[in-house]
Each structure stands twice: as structure tokens, then as C-alpha cells.
Image (cartoon, helix red, strand yellow):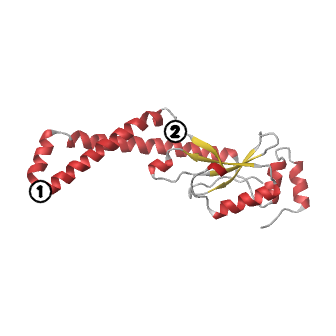
């Protein structure tokens, strides 16, 4: 891991936007992401998720409006074997259940209640990659009082899509400064880095 030279640290400290957390992270070879690029990306992901759920709902609704008609079921009963027809009916039932689930989630999505959750890293109940755990260890060696959180999209696990976790380091002294230091499970993210 490459560390900053003393001269680079002094130059960075002269920068009024840099504070001790940022300087320490950069000295560890960790270049935080700009908050603006993370928030812009998260906004786009929320919009995509809302669009996907709405499209999925409309597709299910369209299919069910056709498949729920008695004449449709009668015609299928005549052209299918008994086992095929029972399987088809089970599939229609599955779609009704899925439609009801989507109907419950759709207002949440439409009214922007889908959001990114913030949870302490040590309380996460999901797998955290080794590269992230190594970074956390490095941060705690240099900054033992830094709190670490993960910000993630609350609907992603349910949707079977990446949950887009961002690792955030928070300055424990005044709790006013935070840096986005790592993202994983999100190959599309190309955020701007500081320094």
C-alpha cells in the first residue's frame, strides 16, 4: 500500500476543504469518493428501481387481465392435458400473488419512500468482502475512533439486484464529517475521487 509523503500531507492540510479524516484516509492510500458523485449515482439508481417495479407491475397486470377471463381458462382447459392445465393454473396463482406484492410496493416506490438505509458495519448481517474488511482494519489501525457505516438500497435484495453498499467512514470527534471510502457489489458505479 502506498502512503503519502509528508510533503503531500502538509499540502493537503493547507487545503481548507481537507480535514483530519480525509488526510488520514489519503495517507493510507484510500481516496474517498466525492459525496456529489455518490448522491448523483444513488438518485439514478432509485429512479431505475422505480421504473423497473412499475414496468413489472404493468406487465403482470396485463397478463392477468387476459388470463383471468373465464373464456381463456375454458379454452386452455380444452387444449391442455389435466397436468398441464393444473400447472398453468398454479402459474396464474403465482402471478396473482406477485401482482399483490407489487401493488403493495408500488405506492412506496411512486412516493419516493424507497431509500438508502444506513447501518453500522458491525451490525450488518450480510457477507462483507475481504477487501472491505482489510480496508476497515487499516482504517481502525490509523483512526481507532472512526465509526464505519454501510449505506445500501433497501429494495435491492428483494428485487434480486445488487444492493449497492457504500462504506462510509465517520469522524468520531464531531460526527460532522463523513467520507465514502469504498463501494462493492456495484460494477456500474464510477464515482469521482477526492485528491
- Quadrant including the C terminus: bottom right
- Quadrant including the N terminus: bottom right
Instruction: Identify the residue shown where x is 53% and y is 46%.
Output: 45
The residue where tag 1 is placed is 81
Q: Percent x, y for residue 93?
A: 26, 45
Give me the C-alpha separation between circle 2 and circle 1: 44 Å
Q: Percent x, y for residue 174?
A: 81, 39
- Up/down of 108 relative to 40, above or below: above
Disc 2 or disc 1, which is closer to the eye?
1
The residue positioned farthest toward the bottom in the image shown: 1
Q: Percent x, y for residue 81?
A: 11, 56
Left/right of residue 194 with respect to residue 70 in the rendered view: right
Instruction: Identify the residue shown where x is 67% and y is 44%.
Output: 36
- Up/down of 13 relative to 102, above or below: below
Q: Quadrant of residue 182?
A: bottom right
Instruction: Identify the residue shown where x is 66% and y is 63%.
Output: 131
Q: Nearer the viewer, residue 55 or 105?
A: 105
Q: Nearer the viewer, residue 7 or 69?
A: 69
Disc marking residue 68: none
The residue where tag 2 is placed is 114
Left/right of residue 34 with respect to residue 99 in the rendered view: right
Q: Secondary structure at mark 2?
A: loop
Amino acid at each position: 500500500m502506498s502512503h503519502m509523503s509528508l510533503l503531500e500531507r502538509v499540502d493537503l492540510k493547507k487545503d481548507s476543504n481537507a480535514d483530519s479524516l480525509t488526510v488520514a484516509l489519503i495517507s493510507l492510500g484510500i481516496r474517498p469518493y466525492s459525496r456529489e458523485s455518490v448522491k448523483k449515482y444513488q438518485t439514478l439508481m432509485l429512479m431505475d428501481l422505480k421504473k423497473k417495479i412499475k414496468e413489472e407491475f404493468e406487465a403482470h397486470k396485463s397478463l392477468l387481465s387476459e388470463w383471468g377471463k373465464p373464456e381463456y381458462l375454458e379454452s386452455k382447459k380444452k387444449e391442455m392435458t389435466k397436468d398441464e392445465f393444473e400447472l398453468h393454473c398454479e402459474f396464474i396463482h403465482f402471478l396473482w400473488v406477485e401482482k399483490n406484492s407489487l401493488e403493495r410496493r408500488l405506492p412506496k416506490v411512486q412516493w419516493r419512500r424507497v431509500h438508502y438505509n444506513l447501518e453500522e458495519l458491525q451490525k450488518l448481517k450480510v457477507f462483507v468482502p475481504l477487501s472491505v474488511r482489510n480496508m476497515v482494519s487499516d482504517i481502525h489501525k490509523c483512526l481507532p475512533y472512526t465509526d464505519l457505516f454501510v449505506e445500501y438500497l433497501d429494495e435491492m435484495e428483494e428485487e434480486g439486484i445488487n444492493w449497492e453498499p457504500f462504506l462510509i467512514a465517520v469522524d468520531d470527534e464531531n460526527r460532522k464529517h463523513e467520507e465514502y471510502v469504498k463501494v462493492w457489489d456495484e460494477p456500474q458505479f464510477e464515482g469521482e475521487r477526492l485528491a
